Image: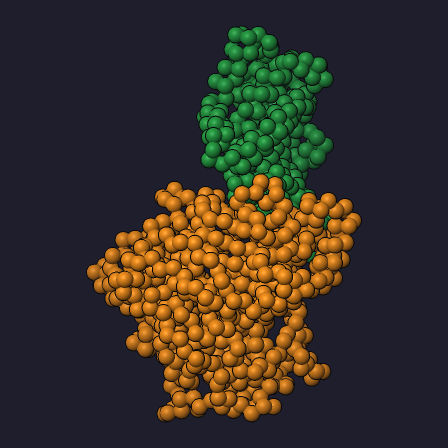
Amino acid sequence: MVRYLITRLGQALIVIVLVTVIAFIILHLLPGGAARSALGKEATLEQLAAFNHEMGYDRPWVQQYLMYVQRLLHGDLGYSFQLNQSVTEAIGQRLPKTMALSLLSTLLAVVVAIPLGVIQAVRRNRWPDYAITSLSLLAYATPIFFMGLMMIILFSQVWPILPPEAPQGFTLGEMLAEPAGLVLPTVTLAIVTIAVYSRYVRSSMVDNLNENYVRTARSKGLSERRVVVLHTLRNGLFPVITLLGMYLPALFSGALVVESLFNFPGMGQLFWQAALKRDFPILLGVTLIISVATVLGALLADLLYAAVDPRVRLRGRTS
Amino acid sequence: MSAPIEFTVRHDEAARDAGENEPLLRLRNLHTDIALRRGTVHALDDVNLEVRPGETLGIVGESGSGKTMTALSVMGLLPSGGSVVGGQILFEGRDLRSLPTDEVRRIRGVRMGMVFQDPLTSLNPTMRIGTQVAEPLRVHEGAGKAQARERAIEILRRVGMPRPDRIVDNYPHELSGGMRQRVAIAMALICSPRLLIADEPTTALDVTTQRQILELLDDLREEFGMAVILVTHDLGVIAGRADRVAVMYAGRVVETAATAELFRSPRHRYTEALMEALPEMAVREPGVPERLYSIPGLPPDLSRPPAGCRFAPRCRFGTDECRTTEVTLSTGGHQHACLHPVALTTAAPAARTAPVSAPAVDASGPAPEPILSVRGLVKDYEATTGGLLRRTTGRVSAVAGVSFEVRPGETFGLVGESGCGKSTVGRLVVGLEQPTDGQIVLDGTDIARLPRRERRRMHRQVQLMFQDSYAAMNPRMRVDAILSEPLEIQQVGDTAARRARIGTLLDQVGLSRRVLERYPHEFSGGQLQRIGLARSLALQPRLIVGDEPVSALDVSIQAQVLNLMRDLQRELGLAYVFISHDLSVVDYMADRIGVMYLGKLVEVGPAYDVVRSARHPYTQALLDAVPSATPDLAAPRESVTIRGELPSALNPPTGCRFRTRCPLAQEICETEPPLAGAAHQVACHFPLRQEGGAEA
């Protein structure tokens, strides 16, 4: 197990190093270079040269990369002149909020989607299956901004029980103090995820219920409930773990549309505004964070696999 | 539909159990349907059977005969869409169909047990062995955790599991196939059931493991005093183990009798045909095996079952009467549903007793140059760990110094159990893999050392035939594309010439030209194997390597394909390398046989000699383990029984690789024995016989 962990961590590290190289190259391919992007169109050549010298951009490529990595290791992702704030600070403010939103909605999605998928698989090709399938296809096909708008209209206009906007607190704590404002963004974000996850759970459970080991379990005279919950569910949830791992980047990047719609001060909004204002340090910082999150997500999913699937565990141990 | 038939079987075995004359299980007029999208398949049609306490009933039949459906109907485990639509399932006098669900579930969990075919997929991969085995105890008898664990260890020990106290905490993937089947048996037996249903319990296992498992089932039946229903397609397995046999065809029982009687004088024409289609029945004289009887056509479509006797359309003796009259089982101890049954005889069929000395192998004239000559072939696979950072942690020795020759027009049979390296040899010969060392000389050229382009040209000379032709064909290609692809790759002829060639190929394998526009999924297994053979023949090769080419087929279809392969060999002067785990098929097909064990050839010789006077203890053990369909007539056996499991090819034993399991092994066996002898070679320090057959 330990060796398995070390191997996978090593692989993750290599990928992350590659990501920093690519991010670094992009930084240097910026039209006019970083200096032009930071100082704007009006800057004179002398100003650009001075900036480049100050930032070390006139030094050899490899040295610059090492400096870049060194800064990264110290948590320095760069400085946004537009926000007049370091990238680390800008992200640090928004990341917890985005993570709270994503975690809440993912949790909601998983808690709802697994039972839905199981019900569909057990009642396959009967009315509960058809009903849930239709609803999830509808949810899946609805554009998320439209879904959000409908939610706002329904629950804060027609039947005004919830605020249409996310809480605007400066810290996460202040936001969590107003839970009512979090309901609509969380639910909107969760609905599509529920639709996707329940489809996965359904097909995985349908496959597993046709497996020979389930027939063996039935031959032992077990109740249907025990067969489904104790024997099939654990094997049926493997695809969901992969999905969760793939979803981890979204935990950091935030949901662009939902954050804009509900004016939620998170990573998605930050990224969106940076893209509009050509705020490259922010864009690069966010990209790097997401890349690292993607790699870590895959790693985490693999480790979760190892925790639940004894076959994976063994492969690591006997090697 | 026939009237209900009461069984009045005179039953010797059951008579032992005085006072327990009531059958344990009785199926009366059982009808089972399976609803599919395109219609309803009447899988069982009026099945009547009974099992008495303590007896073994064998149910035998080909795929689609309803034998498994019968078992699943009893256990209430029919696949989705399947349901029992008529009749009674009387277990200990009570009809399971009219009892409440919970009650039936309890009966199935406690009073019955079932063992399934594929031990690799029949256990829950994420549950510990002990938990799975003891689960019925916990559920039905309310046993505590510690008690359940103890009973699990006890029953695992009883089914011959080594170190059961450690195995209980293992997961299924840590055990071999044979060990997993023991776990499945332990699981079925933990509540001491009255009835055990074993559905093809050994079909997925090697013969030596099969023998161990069947013997275990026999022992347990006696110890537990339970009845066993043994469902199988293998007449040999039935012959050795069952007290009584029911033969099924197309959803009906066509014949039932005491085992010895059934095999001595089958009455139904289907049973007769099935036995004649067995390769082991055909081998009478050395060198000139008679043609196998092959049942023409295919079993009927059970969504629209034909009237009358369902076998009539394929029967040699079928008359118009057969096709119109419903035939019911006759009464008495030996029942059959046939209008023109085989006449009763008292003469026993010829057994597989054979003269010990073999006639000299075709010594007329100088032997022709071999088309294929394999010398010192070695294939190692690197065992690696990790994904990206691969490191070699060992060497799996798949093939370790194999040498043999194949002459034009000859069939060389390669036998051995799974993992012995026979398929790897096949893949190396056709060039799908590169050998680590050694030579593969095809027609005078060493193809192992050829540059890529020239190796491609050599493919014209040697082609591969697969076990699962369906998996080996692109499902989105029509048959015409499948057959012309090899010609296109090798740039043979123009479009018209290719089309003509494909037509010839179809004629050769006995298929009509209409198949050209169809897709692989539209064909049956036997037809697919014909198409596969046609594809191998497309480039007019001189050598075809067949890797288990008939293993997935039913006996009657297998006979068709084997006959076809023989006919084509004679017409085209083909040579075959015939790879199979099935000794009786290889015995029928091959002129010479090589026996492999753990990457090495342990014995090579004329087929007749190897099978009838084996020299290597492993060969003898393999032969002894093959169940024969002529049970009481079999010649007295040497009986070399091997125990234990195949060693890992990662660290194979030094010297003779078989020595760790060999009853004759001594110190000298730690040095490697050479393959010695003239025509009949053996690699053993203590061969069972001298060459020529004299006992050692």
Write down which chain is painted orange: B
B206 relative position to B590: left or right = right
Q: Quadrant of residue B411?
A: bottom left
B344 relative position to B642: left or right = left
Residue occupying the point 50% across, 69% down:
B258
Q: Is residue A275 something that shows in the picture?
A: yes
Q: Between B67 and A317, which is closer to the camera in this rendering?
A: B67
Residue occupying the point 32% across, 73% down:
B568
Way the structure is coloured? by chain
Residue occupying the point 71% across, 46% down:
B141
Q: Is residue B547 something that shows in the picture?
A: no
Q: Between A297 and B40, which is closer to the camera in this rendering?
A: B40
Residue B273 at x, y = what percent? 38, 70
The number of numbered badges drawn on the structure is: 0
Residue placed farthest to the right in the image?
Answer: B146
B288 relative position to A211: left or right = left
Q: Is residue A185 above or below residue B332?
A: above
Residue placed farthest to the front in the image?
Answer: B19
Quarter containing the C terminus of chain B: bottom right
Write down which chain is painted green: A
Residue B181 at x, y = what percent? 61, 59
Residue B268 at x, y = what percent? 39, 67
Residue occupying the point 52% across, 11% down:
A154
Residue B309 at x, y = what percent? 34, 60
Q: Between B25 and B656, which is closer to the camera in this rendering?
A: B25
Q: Between B580 and B83, which is closer to the camera in this rendering?
A: B83
